[in-house]
Image (cartoon, helix red, strand yellow):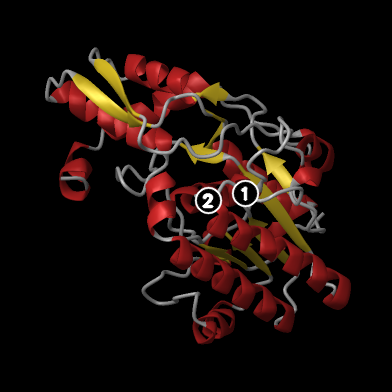
Amino acid sequence: MLDLKKHKIVITGGAGFLGQFVQKTLLSHGVSQGQIFIPRRKDYDLTCEANVIRLYEDAKPDVVIHLAAEVGGIGANRDHPGRFCFANLSMGMHLIEHARKNKIKKFVQTGTVCAYPKFAPIPFKEDDLWNGFPEETNAPYGVAKKTLSVMLDGYQREYGLDSAVVLPVNLYGPGDNFDLHTSHVIPALIRKCIEARDRGADYIECWGTGSASREFLYVEDAAEAIVVAAEKVDHPAPINLGTGSEIMIKDLVELVTKLCRFKGEIKWDTTKPDGQPRRCLNTERAKKVMGWQAKVGFEEGLKKTIAWFESQDQVREIRYR
């Protein structure tokens, strides 16, 4: 087991939604703030190798937790397949190569549920990861992330670089991205419902048919899993992070509208894609290898997320007008 209290840690994407909770979790595990280095994009564009080299020179880390990604919901993935493939591949490739050169003790890679085949058996098991092509909308992002796990496997076998690869399902929670075009389904839906409720709208419009299913993981649970992986896992065999429970999008919409107190109609735009038909993870490997399982119930997590968003009136005026 790696004692993180004794090491310097770089968290790429550490100022983002998940990264802020990973920071808090590290502190709760006894790591001091002075041991943590958060590269900001304005200072270190990690798609550029020279900036990755400079990051390692400046921070001198022993552990890298790679959370940074360019990603979004169905709309963003459909609009930027090339960028998402390039950015995620290049960031990971440069960071892993120079982790090797700098003799990093542990590299933690966050993968994605989007890497699974479009029609993988439910619940998704890690051994099925390569048994088919991902859902087309998410494929460039998913394949990029999946490729990095192969790189880490090769780097451990050839160079002895210890690493962990975790595959979280869609995350949600306070501080999420609530932009309607780039966010995932839960924050986008919460924003739609609250803004429609506040202006007295008669309906909201949702993409697709509502027949697809998804699994969601509260961000604090994900952060705990990532820190535990940094401590306990030293081989890049992928590990699913989720709750093992799925919900149909139609049922999700009805639940969120109820919790947001929106009384209007729900209209479905069936010209828009549903995305992958189903997503639900088998999480037995996480329990066996890390002793981890999710703790926050779905409705409890939704209530916390909605309460946070409703408390951000000034932020919403600035960011979302």
Q: Residues within 10 Å of mark 1 (few under 14, many from 20)?
A: many
Q: Residue 87's x, y, as percent?
A: 50, 69
Q: Is residue 139 left or right of residue 76?
A: right
Residue 201 falls in image quadrant: top left
Q: Is residue 219 visible?
A: no
Residue at left offset 15%, top offset 43%: 317
Which amino acid type is marked by label 1?
Answer: Pro
Secondary structure of the residue carrying tag 1 is loop
Coordinates of residue 214 in the picture (x, y in percent)? 55, 31
Asked whether the residues under the numbered discs 1 and 2 touch, taking CB atoms below 8 Å apart as contact, a structural biologist would say: yes
* Vertical order, 301 against 264 (above or below): below
Q: Quadrant of residue 122?
A: top right
Q: Nearer the viewer, residue 114 or 64?
A: 114
> At 24% from the left edge and 12% from the top edge, which residue is drawn?
263
Residue at 39%, 52% in the rendered image: 76
Q: Quadrant of the C terminus?
A: top left
Q: Is residue 290 left or right of residue 198?
A: right
Q: Please tell me which residue lies in front, 152 or 25.
A: 152
Please tell me the numbered disc located at residue 138: 2
Q: Around disc 2, counting alpha carbons within 10 Å, would you say few (fewer than 14), some (14 to 19), or many (20 or more)?
A: many
Task: Give above or below for 21 relative to 81.
Answer: above
* Residue with the most extreme right position: 157
Give the secondary structure at mark 2: loop
Q: Could you tell me which residue is drawn at 57 percent across and 31 percent down?
A: 215
Q: CA distance from mark 1 to mark 2?
A: 7 Å
Q: Quadrant of residue 262?
A: top left
Look at mark 1 in the image and give the residue it sits on: 134
